[in-house]
Amino acid sequence: MFVTIAAVVTSAMMRGPFPIMSTPYFEDGSVDYDGLSREVRYLEKCGTPGAIWCQSNDAVDLLTTEEKFKGFEACATAAEDLKVVLTLGANGTNTAHLLEIATEIEKVAARHPKAKIAMISRPPDDSSSEADIEKAWRALGRIAKRPVIFQTYGTDKTPTPSVALLVRLAKEFPEAYGYIKEEAGGWSACERMLKENEFKPDIKTVMSGWGGWQWLIMLREFGCEGLVTERVAYAPVLAAIWREFSNKSRVNDDRLTLGFALYRLMIDQRNFPGGGLRDYSLYYLVKEGVFKTTVTRRYAKAKETEAGSFGTGKSWKLDSLKIKDSQRRELDRLHETMMRFSSGN
């Protein structure tokens, strides 16, 4: 009789870039679950230590709970026997919804013992106080049997949990908590990161957020040990930056700086369609054979910014990428440069 031993996710594995996977859709707007599986394998191929789904706005807000559960299953099946830590989003409109999803994640993990599975959670959408967040995450701590990354930003209306709360929960639930995606606004994220790292080993890993726009200085100056962002299309360069940062024998930081400059250039094509988390970034995923389409579920009432499309509610419309020939040529050039840099050339 053979007994399958469940894969264990150690704290040492919870470091480095953990890209949030974009959700692939068919032309009719239905979820491409095979595309999710391809995305997990793509991140393994690129060398990122982690892969996250579903955590971004398009996945958290514009998918049904049933679609999320089916996506969890597809991702976990793909992650079996891979090195990548599959990190599934335990988020909800309220605490009960969050716990429903977290319970399903534990069931998925039980069905796929060979997959390395963790969780990530943002404050419930209806949280109006830190006490609300603490109640939700304390309840989650009684369910979670694996590492959980706390995302400190939820919505524009939810408060940012204090460092004291994050430390308190890490002490109370040491097997699950102590991992932070620090996403407070502006420079305060750096200051909070420094404070959080004072509480090691209870706080195990502090990661950057907000598209990685402060990732380099956070790595160099503030004890950052990872990155969580929906920039899956740039996984090759993110993995290369992490390898370079982790290379203790490097003579200087030139290559680290160049890698980060390339990454920032690629995600900052402000006059390209959308200029956000999906949009022209999906062109790269189609180019790599990960996505079949550039179709996006867009909020019916969306606020369009340089950082992307944001909105609220469950109502959505379909959109797809439309780029000019000149823009396509530039994306191709940048992709070629990214792949050369990531291969060490």
Image (tube, rainbow, N blue to C red):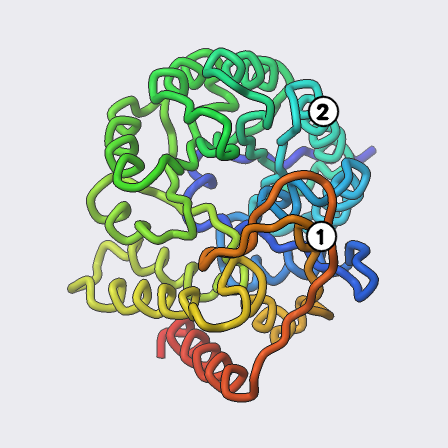
* Tag 1 residue: 78
Above or below — where is 174 with respect to 26? Answer: above
Check disc 2 and report its element: helix, strand or loop: helix
Q: Is residue 10 left or right of residue 317?
A: left
Mark 2 or mark 1, which is nearer the start of the sequence?
1
Residue 323 seen anywhere in this rendered image of the structure? yes
**Which residue is depicted at the point 20% across and 67% down?**
254
Quadrant location, the N terminus: top right
**Which residue is depicted at the point 65% across and 22% down?**
94
Amino acid type of the residue that numbered disc 1 sits on in the rendered structure: Ala
Front in this rendered view, residue 190 or 339: 190
Amino acid type of the residue that numbered disc 2 sits on in the rendered structure: Thr
Residue 15 location, quadrant: top left
Residue 150 locus on image (x, y percent): 48, 30
Specify the label residue 147 is tagged with: none
Residue 257 location, quadrant: bottom left
Residue 335 locus on image (x, y percent): 48, 77
**Which residue is depicted at the point 39% across and 63% down?**
240
Specify the label residue 103 is tagged with: 2
Q: Is residue 267 left or right of residue 136?
A: left
Residue 10 seen anywhere in this rendered image of the structure? no
Are circles 1 and 2 on residues that touch, CB within 8 Å? no
Residue 65 locus on image (x, y percent): 77, 36
**Which residue is depicted at the point 65% across and 48% down?**
301
Spatial CA span between label 1 and label 2: 20 Å
Front in this rendered view, residue 23 or 79: 23
Residue 51 locus on image (x, y percent): 56, 49
